[in-house]
């Protein structure tokens, strides 16, 4: 289990199932001075299907699953692990491919965060594998750095990867209540129009929550 735990590395992007949610504005929306992007779940799921596990030669594969919330005790956490495995089996039909703690842990979170109603898109990268010879040979799993980029935060290097989703997956842009709607929407529209005609019809609306 120790080797398996270190043989894979998950990269995660988090979404919320709730659109224009006051808790998200409070926690992550800069107190109503941010912008929310709303994506089409079905399109994101189809993207994960294109990159799902096929055989042992796959080094990168994707999945889109809901987060299971657990209280801080062993029994509760184990139940959340079981729910995460069952979710994977129901959606992808590959329960045996989400079998170790590192993979399951990516979809389990403390119950204190349940208001986030989170869903996560994960790209799982198999690390490189090396065998160190000798009478008692051992394996090591150095990080597979293909496509990995680093950014600095609090004097630490944080690895991440860039994911590309179809333009059609972006459904709406919701502007925080405490931003100037006209100025912000004009700036966003100008930016998107310079990218591609496919962005021209993305709806831009103001949040319904008067956040103070």
Image: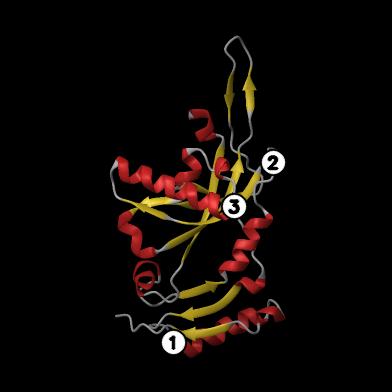
Residue shown at the point (38%, 52%) measured from the top left = 109
- Does label 1 or label 3 sit earlier along the sequence? 3
**Looking at the rendering, which quadrant does residue 41 occupy?**
bottom right
Q: Residues within 10 Å of mark 2 (few under 14, many from 20)?
A: few
Image coordinates for residue 149, horizontal then vertical, percent: 60, 50
Q: Residues within 10 Å of mark 3 (few under 14, many from 20)?
A: some
Cα distance between the residues tagged 2 and 3: 14 Å
Residue at mark 1: 180
Residue shown at the point (59%, 52%) measured from the top left = 92
| Lateral position of residue 32 relative to residue 190, left or right | left
Relative to residue 57, is residue 119 depicted above or below? Answer: below
| Lateral position of residue 156 relative to residue 110, left or right | right
- Closer to the eye: label 1 or 3: 3
Question: Which quadrant does the C terminus fall into?
Answer: bottom left
Q: Nearer the viewer, residue 179 or 2?
A: 2
- Closer to the eye: label 1 or 2: 2
Colouring of the image:
secondary structure
Image coordinates for residue 142, horizontal then vertical, percent: 59, 33
Relative to residue 39, is residue 183 depicted above or below? Answer: below
Q: Secondary structure at mark 2?
A: loop
Which mark identifies residue 92? 3
Which mark identifies residue 55? 2
Cα distance between the residues tagged 1 and 3: 43 Å
Q: Residues within 10 Å of mark 1 (few under 14, many from 20)?
A: few
Residue shown at the point (37%, 42%) measured from the top left = 78
Q: Secondary structure at mark 1?
A: loop
**Looking at the rendering, which quadrant does residue 166 occupy?**
bottom right
Image coordinates for residue 70, horizontal then vertical, percent: 34, 50
Residue shown at the point (48%, 80%) measured from the top left = 174
- Does label 2 or label 3 sit earlier along the sequence? 2
């Amino acid at each position: 289990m120790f080797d398996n735990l270190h043989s894979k590395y998950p990269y995660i992007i988090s979404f919320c199932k709730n659109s224009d949610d006051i808790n998200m504005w409070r926690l992550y929306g800069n107190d109503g001075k941010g912008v929310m992007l709303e994506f089409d779940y079905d399109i994101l799921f189809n993207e994960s299907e294109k990159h799902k596990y096929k055989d042992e030669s796959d080094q990168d594969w994707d999945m889109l699953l809901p987060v299971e919330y657990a209280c801080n005790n062993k029994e509760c956490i184990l139940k959340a692990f079981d729910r995460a495995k069952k979710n994977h089996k129901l959606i992808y039909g590959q329960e045996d491919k989400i079998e170790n703690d590192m993979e399951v842990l990516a979809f389990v979170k403390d119950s204190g965060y349940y208001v986030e109603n989170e869903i996560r898109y994960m790209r799982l990268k198999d690390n490189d594998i090396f065998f160190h010879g000798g009478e008692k040979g051992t394996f090591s799993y150095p990080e597979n750095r293909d496509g990995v980029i680093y950014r600095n935060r609090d004097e630490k290097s944080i690895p991440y990867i860039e994911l590309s989703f179809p333009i059609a997956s972006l459904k709406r842009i919701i502007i925080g209540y405490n931003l100037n709607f006209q100025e912000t929407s004009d700036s966003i529209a100008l930016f998107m129009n310079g990218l591609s005609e496919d962005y021209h019809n993305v709806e831009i609306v103001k949040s319904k929550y008067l956040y103070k």
